[in-house]
Image (tube, grey):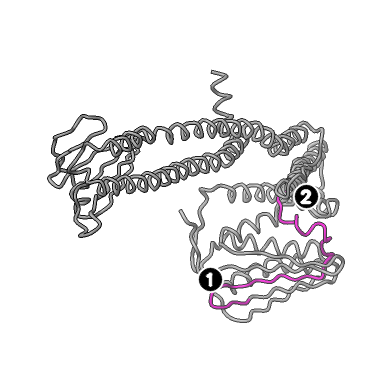
Amino acid sequence: MKVKTKLKSFLKSLKFRIILIIIIFGTLPTVLVSLSMLRSYENRAVSVQSIEILNQAKILGNQIVMNDFMNDLSSETILGEITQFSNIYDGRVMLINQSLEVILDSYSLDVGKTIVSEKVILSLNGEEISKYDSEIGYIELVVPLTEAENQEVLGVLLVSVSTDSIATNLEYLSDGALIISAGILFVMIILSVLTSGRLVKPFGDMAKSLRDIDTGHSNSLEIHDYTETTHISNEFNKLHTRMKVMDSSREEFVSNVSHELKTPLTSMKVLADSLNGSDEVPVELYREFMQDIGNEIDRETKIINDLLSLVKMDRSSTGLNIESVNINDLIELILKRLRPIAQRQSIEIVLESFRPVTAEVDEVKMTLAITNLVENAIKYNKPEGWIHVSLNADHQYFYIKVEDSGIGIPEESINNIFERFYRVDKSHSREIGGTGLGLAITRSVVHLHRGAIKVFSVEGEGTVFDVRIPLSYIPPEK
């Protein structure tokens, strides 16, 4: 069973395919050329022998006519020439008169018999007939015996000559061609095995490098034997780097979320213990502690809601509640809720609507996405900064731009900010309560609506988020 599995694996391998291709394209031309040459030799040999025999048959025929041998078969000279002709060419000579009667047969088998044959009749009409029968190995010629004076056909000379000599030579050449082909096949097998081993070696090295990366003995794939392996190596290294960043971010996220979830609980525990540990607590202090507990509960709820939102959007079964929504009113409502938070940092929020926009969206999810963008603009802004939100549309899409005068995003972090769990300034994010999920949620919402989101930022100067969403919802293909 193990041998069968290995054999099946080998037959499906690239190495076997290379071996097969080299053997086929290495030996097939040789076989075709050999067959072509053998066929050409046979045709040429038959043609040469046919011409030679035809010429000799004509000479013999002229002597038969000149010596009136058709009427007097006693000429020893003609009989000797016929016998010699038959012996030299290993053939049979038959003399047939106008009545289709065989009057002479060098084999003495059909004398006196009548031969009704198409080629004999045609020859009696003056035609020369030549035919090669490869199956029985004979060349058959029919030559009219024509009187020179009045061009009367007195009879025909029918000659059948064996092509055994040609067949023998052909067999000898075939054996030689077979030996040459076998030798070439042997060389091709050895060459194909060596070549295929060399050609697939980079893929074996690649598999080994991947195992080393998996076990931690290597950090990158460096196989540069071919352009293709170089391209694969580069793309894999990019993916591997990205995965390492993701793993690092995920580990950090678990740590951060654990800390974020634990901190409010710890604060509430401390506040509750303080209240329980005192016999008489002033009303003012009691209210202050309860308000702090409420704030910690809100903080805990925000973290949990962000996690739940992301998980729900990851589920393929999660559908969108699509309805026609006034986007102008939606953004104004969002900004109305967020302006008090911005005012605490003296940040001005300005909304610029270029035209009324109504679109088919999931209002809850779209609210969440826009809220995250504006909240980020507030969190990472400078004191007394500004936020500019604009809304525009064309015949197909509506566009939302959120621009701020904040701290900006480092260039090396631009490509990662939409990854879940990723936070640019980890210490600052923790201070303001960020979990690194906001932009990941926003991107998921935009993509669910078949839209696109881009970011442009200059560190220390500010950030711009551009969102494009179709006015009419495009359902996914099933």
Total count of labels: 2
Query: Residue 154 appears at what percent x and percent y?
Result: 19, 50
Is residue 418 found inside the magenta-colored segment of the image?
A: yes
Residue 155: in magenta span:
no
> Where in the figure is residue 164, as x and y percent of width and height?
40, 32
When the figure is inspected, residue 441 is found, relative to residue 53, above or below; the finding is: below
Residue at the image position 51 percent from the left and 34 percent from the top:
173
Element at label 1: loop
Q: Amino acid at mark 2?
A: Asp
Residue at the extreme bottom of the image, as rendered: 354
- Reading the image, the residue beneath label 2 is 292
Q: Secondary structure at mark 2?
A: helix
Q: Is residue 93 left or right of residue 113?
A: right
Tell me where residue 87 sits by quadrant.
top left
Find disc 1 in the rendering and name its residue.
Answer: 471
User: How many residues crowd mark 1 within 10 Å: few (<14), some (14–19), many (20+)?
Assistant: many
Q: Which label's residue is closer to the chain start, 2 or 1?
A: 2
